[in-house]
Image (cartoon, rainbow, N blue to C red):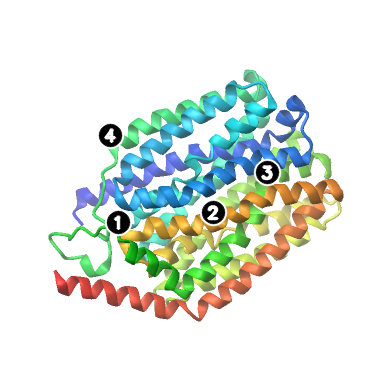
Amino acid sequence: MSKENSSYRWFVVVVFFFFMLLHQTDKLMIGSLQVQISDEFGLDNKQWGLVNAGALLVATVLYPVWGYLYDRYSRTKLISLASFIWGATTWMNAIVHTFGGFLFTRASTGIDDSSYPGLFTLIADYFGPNLRGKVYGILQLAQPLGYLIGMILALIVAPMIGGWRSIFYITGSLGLVLAVIIYFGVKEMPRGQAEPEFENMAEMQTFKFSWGEAKEIFKKKTMWFVFLQGFAGVFPWNVITFFFFGYLEKERGYDPNSILMTMAPVILILAAGYFVGGWMGDAAFKYSNKGRIIVSSVGVLLGATFMYFALTTPTEARTQFFILMCLAALFMPLSSANVIATVYDITVPEIRSTAQAVEYFVENAGAIFAPIITGFIADAFDLKTAILLICTVAWGLCFFFYLGAIFTIDKDSHDLRKQMAERVKAM
């Protein structure tokens, strides 16, 4: 890759980082607004769970659609469209003044939430297998940083500028601006461009989506373990996203300033964990195809352990709670970038968006139920019980699913490299 192209691919990373950062800010700050919005509409925990489940349901249904479109058409133009939809639906969500309207428009914000597979597969065509984990780790810094920015906007800025609706207008407008930047500034790349077998080729063959290759996704045993861990693994993340601030305020007695001072460092450590996980996964991958899976399994095991000890810490022991939450935050995201990279380590370039979309579809199938189940458990017992039960059980299951993938990843990775080599010979 020329120096100019090498510099440009990092420009693309920067653009996509800000897309993800601002999109995640818009998506995740609703968790910090739980008390404000619930008070305005008079919502209980079950109704709050339904509000968040609606967007997850819409995103789930549309994942296969986005995945198919990304593998057939220009990914850059579709990502631009997703950014426009994000801006428009967030504005709609800010305008309504009834609970029914808020429930409907909040669900519509899920349309663009299923747009990430095209972004990740486009990056895979800019960066080879040995760098993807780090790049995905950098991009996924956007999720916790967006969570932190959303928290600041919700707890500090919103009361100063007229409430949560004003914040939605701001983040929605930024989505519209980014739609223009992506449409005119990001170039499409040939699918498979960065695969090592095609590294020195002057001209790339165009690989087109085929249903035959798409069916092969389900013949790879590793993908089934990825699906299973994805289904279980999203439960904790959605519980933490939508209920943790309410837990801190209602059950641990934290005021908004205490929440910010506690969670800001935790979220920054969580952000670092994404990059650390990607870096560790790339380093381990150089020695073994099992490397990314091993890093992922260690992450979920230690994350669950420290989360358990944090939640069972007495409410008066705030320093101990803070330290344990920091340790949990470091290990929780180690698997994230590695799961994405693993999907691309075993699937051919022209169906990777579809493969990633199917994986996210399965994830969101679990995510839909997470807020609802949490709401019912919280109303029956308390938020601590709900968060503790769901996090420990779900991450425990993920650990065993990763153990299964350790036994299948070598064959699936070898099959892909063999298929890529055969394509080079056929050109």
Dot 3, how many residues are within 10 Å of its Cα: few (below 14), some (14-19), or many (20+)?
Answer: many
Disc 3 residue type? Phe
Q: Can residue 242 be seen here?
A: yes
Write the residue at 34% across / 77% down: 415
Q: Earlier in the sequence, mark 3 or mark 2?
A: 3
Q: Is residue 261 visible?
A: no
Cα distance in 3D space between marks 4 and 3? 35 Å
Q: Nearer the viewer, mark 3 or mark 2?
A: 3
Where residue 161 sits in the image (x, y, percent)? 62, 19
Residue most toward the front? Answer: 211
Q: Is residue 287 above or below residue 328?
A: below
Viewer-closest of 91 and 290: 91
Q: Amino acid at mark 1?
A: Asp
Circle number at residue 242: 3
Element carrying mark 2: helix
* Quadrant where the image shows the C terminus: bottom left
Q: Secondary structure at mark 3?
A: helix
Determine which quarter of the picture holds residue 187: top left
Q: Residue at x 78, y 51 (%)?
A: 319
- The amino acid type found where label 4 is placed reads Phe
Mark 4 in CB contact with mark 3 (< 8 angstroms): no
Chain-order first, disc 4 or disc 2? 4
Residue at the disc numbered 4? 184
The answer to whether the residues at label 1 and label 3 have Cβ atoms under 8 Å apart is no
Query: Looking at the image, is mark 1 or mark 3 earlier in the sequence?
Result: 1
Near mark 4 (Cα within 10 A), the count class, few <14, some 14-19 or many ≥20, is few
Mark earlier in primary sequence (2, 1): 1
Calculate the distance from the C-alpha at mark 3 to the C-alpha at mark 2: 21 Å
Residue at the disc numbered 2 = 272
Q: Which residue is mark 1?
A: 125
